[in-house]
Amino acid sequence: MKVIAMFWSISLLLQPSLTSTALAAQNPRVQVALTLQHPVNGVSTTPDGRLFVLYARVDGSTGPQVAEWHNGSSPTPYPNQEWNSYAGGKDPATHLVRTNSQRIGPDGTLWLVDTGSPGFGEPVILPDGPKLVQVNLTTDSVTRVYNLGNVTLATILIDDVRFNPAVGLAYITDAGAPALIVLDLDSSQARRVLENDPTNEAFYNSSLASVLAQYPEPYALTPSTGGTDIDAEGNIYNSDTNRQAIIKIAPNGTWTTLVQDSRLLWVDAMWIDTDGKLWMPAAQLNRGTPFNNGSSWIQKPLYVYTIDLGVGPSPIDHA
């Protein structure tokens, strides 16, 4: 969290210059989908039109973390109020302590990544705080909770998840103690990989040069980003938080600017729906209380925007 906080501070120092000529003009392709009074850093939709949002709660407000919007009206806590009512003394195993990511997986259920930390920079509640929660969208109830206390530390920040349905695995990122957590969804067994990975250490043994081809290589240079998504053609969309832009990375690793717009202020977790629209929550996270000594500089109202892509989501990413 120290590294993240430092980065946010630097971003904030640059903010005055970014609010003038450096910002791009508004692009007519970018449309307002939701108007909000509190920051939302994640959106997901179902093919039949249901809409779920994740409140970042970085503006000093309180309330539900995960909510469902009904016909564009006021949101309701999801899956229910009780799961969203964590406070000291309540069981962290059966409540959302602080959710950092929500998304509908390729199986059609809603998945919630709970950091297990009551607030930004606060120690994680072990062992029951950090977890991956699965919610059945038909019954609107929690069907399974994957406890991650045995593969996390008090300083961790588990923050997002992706799935490989072919092998039944979930991949969870840990941004606090950098590593990936590989979770077997059948057995609930989890392990940490790439922790303290020595990829930056020099390699001098020429007799082993033949094995170098087995090592990963850089795919594409990316800017500072708040979130990504992938479409059915294998293109990756990356939010450029410095330029208020969305970058499109082709399967061959080359990238172009999809759109640049002054309203795209720290776009976080994006979402491609079945109509071929990219949802972009402009969360203004760099203006939030965790990164400004407890003061919120967030300008309200806030917005979730969409832009037409003409292509749907990757089938292995979500339903």
Image (spheres, rainbow, N blue to C red):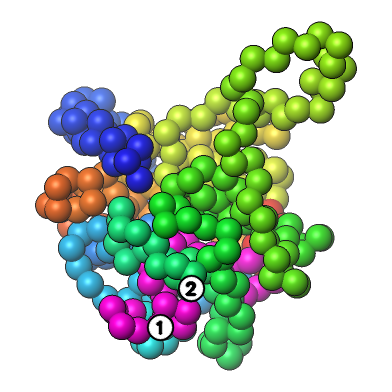
- Cα distance in 3D space between marks 1 and 2: 8 Å
Q: Position of residue 42 (x, y in %)?
A: 43, 60
Q: In this rendering, would 93 be left or right of 319?
A: left
Which residue is at the front of the view, 135 or 267? 135
Question: Which residue lies at the image location 79% right of the left edge and 20% below the top edge?
Answer: 212
Amino acid under disc 1: Asp
Residue 2's quadrant in the figure?
top left
Local SS, label 1: loop
- Residue 292 left/right relative to 269: left
Category of crowding for the residue at label 1, using alpha-carbon neighbours closer than 10 angstroms: few (below 14), some (14–19), many (at least 20): few
Q: Image quadrant of residue 223?
A: top left
Residue in the foreground of this view, choosing between 94 and 137: 94
Side of 104 where 67 appears, left or right:
left
Q: Which residues, given as a range, are shown in magenta? A: 86-115
Q: Residue at x 67, y 61 (%)?
A: 190
Residue 98 part of the magenta-drawn span: yes
Q: Is residue 291 visible to the viewer in this orientation of the structure?
A: yes
68 within the magenta span:
no
Residue, far bottom = 139
Residue 44 position within the rendered picture, expressed as x and y whole percent measured from the top left: 50, 65
Q: Report the label total.
A: 2
- At x 18%, y 26%, the residue is 17
| CB contact under 8 Å: marks 1 and 2 | yes
SS for callout 2: loop
Across and down, in percent, residue 103 comes to 54, 65
